[in-house]
Image (cartoon, grey):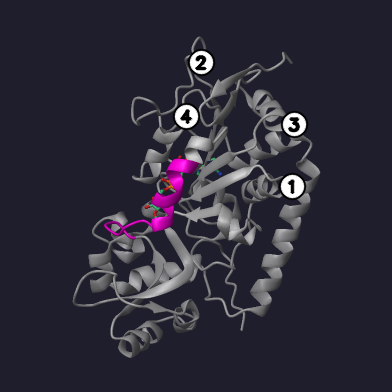
């Protein structure tokens, strides 16, 4: 491979990719990248058995007919939740963390962290699999919240603004099928209890806004995986990457193009300084190819196997709500 040329950059050094493909990215990681920022979405968790949102046929929004929602996004709409909480609670039962094991993508991010070159991982996912994979909390931004915390949504005010509740209260309330559990919890707290998952119309966590500017300014490699980049403000993170920083998209289809988003991807212009690389395909396959080129594949596979075993053990030892819709199995664990 040709040697890389380094050029000065205000907030660090932007290296040149030897080639605009996985080989080039792997060499760049090995030789240069020290502040990698990862942006990810539902596509990194589909191989764990959790559907994404927008894939035709298999995405969650396509498969919500059983809840008779006015439109699919209503499942994450505060006003709808306050009127018809049962649909969202049913979804909570299915998505509750612990029922699923992290994928190769989650563990690849963990390896970046272990090697001290992860600046931050911004995830849109609410499955907490990044943390389950061992990525420390301080290197994570759960931009759309997750099941780590819960709060009471005031029935009258219409805003999820009131006090925090221990998430285990909600977990216990949802353990058994039916509405009794969450109804009792609502009565006890004087309002519906909701995991701190960001609904449409709610603000993203402050951490998202506090860290983004500095993280992206420092970033010397951006990896985007498994997201349609359709949801704002998450997709505006792309606009913050410094010019010419190498960026890798791993996804089934090209997303976030420069025609759609400010400073969006440009995979076609080979004569420019642009260093955007697109791996089209499954996230796990792309990540495994990258890991192989880096000599990390054995470690990655060990972590994936360990994660599967841990998730299995957890399912047999903890009080997880039963889920049945995403997989054929019901992980009833009492
Ligand atoms: P989407 O469902 O919008 O997009 C997932 C993307 O990943 C699509 O481009 C898929 O083609 C791709 N994909 C799916 N499985 C894949 C795989 N195994 N390998 C490669 N690519 C794959 O999901 P997000 O972009 O994450 O909000 O959606 C963003 C937000 O919209 C979510 O966080 C959610 C939703 O409203 C909340 O949960 C609050």
Q: Nearer the viewer, mark 3 or mark 2?
A: 2
Q: Earlier in the sequence, mark 4 or mark 2?
A: 4
Q: Residue at x 57, y 53 (%)?
A: 139
Q: Mark 1 Cα within 10 Å, few/some/many (few <14, many 20+)? A: many
Q: Residue 237 at what x, y percent from top left?
A: 42, 40
* Dot 4: element: loop
The quadrant the C terminus occupies is: bottom right
Q: Indicate if the residue with disc 4 has its beta carbon within 8 Å of ligand 1.
A: no
The residue labelled by disc 2 is 273
The residue labelled by disc 3 is 293
Which span of residues is magenta-colored?
A: 199-214
Residue 300 is tagged as 1
Q: Nearer the viewer, mark 4 or mark 2?
A: 4
Whole-Å distance between the Cαs marked 4 and 2?
Answer: 12 Å
Say whether marks 1 and 3 touch (CB < 8 Å).
Answer: no
Q: Earlier in the sequence, mark 1 or mark 4?
A: 4
**232 relative position to 26: left or right:** left
* Dot 2: element: loop
Q: Mark 3 Cα within 10 Å, few/some/many (few <14, many 20+)? A: some
The residue labelled by disc 4 is 242
Whole-Å distance between the Cαs marked 1 and 4?
Answer: 30 Å
In the picture, residue 86 is in which quadrant?
Answer: bottom left
* Dot 3: element: helix
The answer to if 65 sits in the magenta stretch is: no
Q: Residue at x 44, y 69 (%)?
A: 92
| For residue 89, above or below residue 57 | below
């Amino acid at each position: 491979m040709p040697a890389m040329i380094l050029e000065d950059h205000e907030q660090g050094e932007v290296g040149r990719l030897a080639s605009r493909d996985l080989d080039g990215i792997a060499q760049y990681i090995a030789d240069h990248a020290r502040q990698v920022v990862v942006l990810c979405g539902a596509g990194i968790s589909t191989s764990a058995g959790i559907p994404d949102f927008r894939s035709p046929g298999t995405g969650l929004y396509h498969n919500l007919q059983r809840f008779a929602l006015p439109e699919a996004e209503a499942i994450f709409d505060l006003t709808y939740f306050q009127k018809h909480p049962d649909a969202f609670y049913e979804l909570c039962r299915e998505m509750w963390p612990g029922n699923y094991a992290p994928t190769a993508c989650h563990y690849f991010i963990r390896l970046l962290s272990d090697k001290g070159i992860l600046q931050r991982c911004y995830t849109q996912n609410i499955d907490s699999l990044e943390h389950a994979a061992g990525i420390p909390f301080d290197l994570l931004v759960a931009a759309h919240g997750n099941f780590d915390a819960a709060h009471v949504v005031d029935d009258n005010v219409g805003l999820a603004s009131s006090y925090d509740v221990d998430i285990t209260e909600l977990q216990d309330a949802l353990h058994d099928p039916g509405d009794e559990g969450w109804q009792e919890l609502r009565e006890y707290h004087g309002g519906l209890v909701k995991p701190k998952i960001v609904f449409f119309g709610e603000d993203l966590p402050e951490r998202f806004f506090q860290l983004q500017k500095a993280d992206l300014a420092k970033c010397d490699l951006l990896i985007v995986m498994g997201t349609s980049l359709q949801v704002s403000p998450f997709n505006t993170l792309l606009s913050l990457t410094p010019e010419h920083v190498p960026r890798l998209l791993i996804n089934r289809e090209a997303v976030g193009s420069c025609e759609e988003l400010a400073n969006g991807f440009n995979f076609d212009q080979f004569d420019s300084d642009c260093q955007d690389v697109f791996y089209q395909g499954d996230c796990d396959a792309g990540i495994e190819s990258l890991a192989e080129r880096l000599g990390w594949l054995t470690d990655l596979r060990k972590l994936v196997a360990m994660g599967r075993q841990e998730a299995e053990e957890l399912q047999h030892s903890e009080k997880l709500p039963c889920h049945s819709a995403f997989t054929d199995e019901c992980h009833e664990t009492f």
